[in-house]
Image: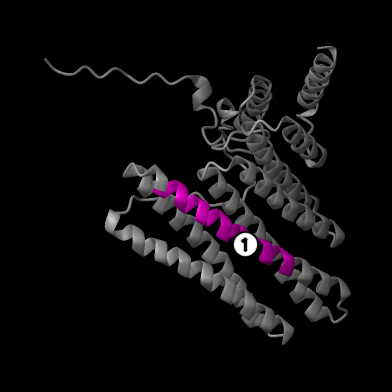
Amino acid sequence: MGITILPLVVSAESEQCPAIDCDCGSLPREAWIETCKAHELDIKANCVANGNTPADYCSLHGPSAKPLPLAMDFAETTVLVEEELSVKAAEIEALYKASFTDLASMKLKVSSLQFKEALALLKSLDSNADALFSLQRQVTTSWLVYENVGEATSAWRDYAGSSSDIAVKYFAYAEELWGKYSNTTNPAVKKAHKVMAFRLLRIAGKTFEMSAYAYAGADKNKNAAKTWSQASDVSKVILAAKQESGAAVSHINYYRYQTAARLHRASYYWAVEGKQNDALKTLTDARDISPMDELSELIALEESQEEDSVVDRLLQ
């Protein structure tokens, strides 16, 4: 007897804009899921009107959502043979060391006004960040394939701390460069400081994202939430700098969306951790900075439920 292959039935809804999936079902509360789904329907409608090309970002979202204005690049990854795992781990360690070295070298180049060389080092820092994240996902995915959850979790924990350490240094020096831009009168030097500050801020934000992703992989939800908030702090600095320097409205709005997306991710991990006040605060911060206003009803509901809970406790 032959095998009968039934035709695949695909709903019209699933065919519309497959590039949009806000991962609403992963959210930890029913009200959040409904808010997420409502926004997803709206942006899918816009997508259809735009020739099945996304024109908007997800708002409140689950960890696998797309599209989002985040910096991490989720390229396809391959499983390593077990003998390669230690080699790749050593490569990761070497890339972290190289990043610290390149940052120190960049500072020296900037102080001596060797901007061409400093920009080359910035490019190296950016490519190192992408390579680190790709290798980290490859190593941890491979450990999971070999059913060694402990090794995967331990690796993510190490990566989280190392990425956080370098991200803090990137952020601090980027703010120093922006200060130099603000206080410099020489037009050429001023322009160089501005370009380098923006580039290093973007690298810092991406590296905080990497750290937060790693904390989540290590089941450290509280740390993940805090680090996503740190990533949003970088976006806020870029946003303020863009506004100060008279950037286009489209550029300013992009960093509003990015700040909100990072805060949404922070709220997700606060909620998973059971920290309701922190989850509500980050949701409110996201609403206040986003160009959209899709969270007002949800936040009003959350605040009402929180107040009712306080009243119930007082009456017991």
Q: Is residue 197 left or right of residue 2?
A: right
| In the foreground, 97 or 185 | 97
Question: In terms of image quadrants, where is residue 222?
Answer: top right
Q: Residues within 10 Å of mark 1 (few under 14, many from 20)?
A: some
In percent of the image, x 51 and y 44: which residue is there?
Answer: 217
Question: In terms of image quadrants, where is residue 178?
Answer: bottom right
In percent of the image, x 71 and y 47: which residue is there?
Answer: 229
Quadrant (top left/top right/bottom left/bottom right) for the N terminus: top left
* Residue 45, horizontal then vertical, whole percent: 64, 27
In percent of the image, x 83 and y 21: which residue is there?
Answer: 307
Quadrant (top left/top right/bottom left/bottom right) for the C terminus: top right
Q: Is residue 117 above or below residue 123?
A: below
The kind of residue on which mark 1 rests is Asp
Q: Is residue 257 left or right of residue 83?
A: right
Please say whether residue 167 is one of the residues in the magenta stretch. yes
* Residue at disc 1, secondary structure: helix
* Residue 109, horizontal then vertical, whole percent: 67, 83
- Residue 264 visible to the viewer: yes
Question: In terms of image quadrants, where is residue 53?
Answer: top right
In percent of the image, x 71 and y 81: which residue is there?
Answer: 110
* Residue 115, horizontal then vertical, whole percent: 69, 81
- Residue 56 visible to the viewer: no
Q: Is residue 254 above or below residue 53?
A: below
Total marks in image? 1
Q: Is residue 53 above or below residue 142?
A: above
* Residue 8, horizontal then vertical, whole percent: 36, 21
Q: Is residue 5 above or below residue 251?
A: above
Q: Which residue appears farthest toward the bottom when viewing the image?
A: 112
Q: Which residue is mark 1?
A: 165
Please say whether residue 208 is one of the residues in the magenta stretch. no
| In the foreground, 103 or 187 | 103
Bounds of the magenta span?
151-173
